[in-house]
């Protein structure tokens, strides 16, 4: 099931934010700090959940648990000085899987899964000048963190195992004054 973003009317899955709209990436554009990650592994149904026949629905919620700004010196400035910064974002993807069970009584069941993720946000495009680093005066408090699931797939591998693939875009957008 999909709906439209209230900001730009772009179709998105419920619970996701609108993906950034920009024609060029880099300084001067609306968004120039982002990363994409693939969350791809299998999920084992916990006991005593019954075996799965078909996946009927999946809900997802992202929780950002830690944001760390790293000072970086790649050797282009004197030792002890900050050349630029990188941002590490860590969190958990909470998945709820509704499925039809291979049992005659109580056909629908629900299983919860917690999937950790971690991503490094750098400046795009990465050039020989910026080397992907955010400016030395970068302040995370001046930015909002956004998450959008660009693609998702779920499959039954066997009666006790599910496969998931999510392509996730995480970006920083300057807060509006």
Image (cartoon, rainbow, N blue to C red):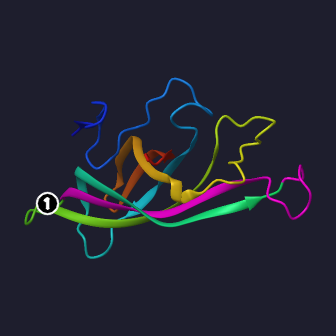
Point out the stretch of residues depicted in magenta.
74-101
Q: Residue at x 55, y 31 (%)?
A: 29
- Say if residue 118 shows up in the picture: no
Main SS type for the magenta part? strand
Residue nearest the viewer, comparing 22 with 101: 22
Of residues 104 and 94, the one nearer the viewer is 94
Residue 27 image point, x, y percent: 62, 34
Residue 59 screen position, x and y as percent: 27, 55
- The residue carrying mark 1 is 108
Horizontal relation, residue 96 to residue 101: left or right:
right
Residue 145: x and y, percent? Answer: 46, 53
- Which quarter shows the N terminus? top left
In which quarter of the view is residue 87 placed? bottom right
Q: Nearer the viewer, residue 113 or 119?
A: 119
Would you call the spot at circle 1 few (<14 residues within 10 Å), some (14-19), or many (20 or more)?
A: some
Q: Residue most toward the left?
A: 105
Left or right side of 93 for 83: right
Vertical side of 76 occupied by 10: above or below:
above
Question: Any magenta on residue 87?
Answer: yes
Residue at image location 21% in from the left, 64% down from the top? 110
Quadrant of the rendered image containing residue 13: top left
Could you tell whether 138 is left or right of 10 in the image? right
User: Which is more toward the observer, 18 or 113?
Assistant: 18
For the point 27% across and 66% down, which residue is it? 111
Q: Residue 158: x and y, percent?
A: 35, 55
């Amino acid at each position: 099931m999909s709906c439209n973003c209230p900001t730009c009317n772009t179709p998105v899955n419920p619970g996701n934010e609108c993906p950034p709209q920009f024609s060029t990436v880099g300084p001067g554009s609306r968004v120039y700090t982002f990363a994409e990650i693939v969350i791809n592994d299998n999920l084992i149904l916990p006991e005593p959940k019954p075996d799965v026949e078909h996946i009927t629905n999946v809900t997802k919620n992202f929780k950002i648990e830690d944001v760390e700004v790293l000072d970086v010196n790649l050797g282009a400035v004197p030792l002890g000085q900050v050349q630029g910064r990188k941002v590490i974002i860590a969190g958990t993807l909470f998945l709820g899987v509704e499925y039809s069970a291979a049992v005659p009584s109580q056909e629908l069941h629900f299983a919860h899964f917690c999937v950790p993720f971690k991503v490094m946000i750098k400046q795009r495009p990465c050039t020989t000048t910026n080397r992907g680093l955010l400016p030395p005066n970068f302040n995370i408090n001046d930015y909002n963190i956004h998450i959008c699931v660009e693609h998702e797939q779920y499959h039954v591998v066997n009666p006790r195992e599910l496969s998931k693939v999510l392509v996730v875009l995480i970006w920083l957008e300057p807060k509006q004054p």
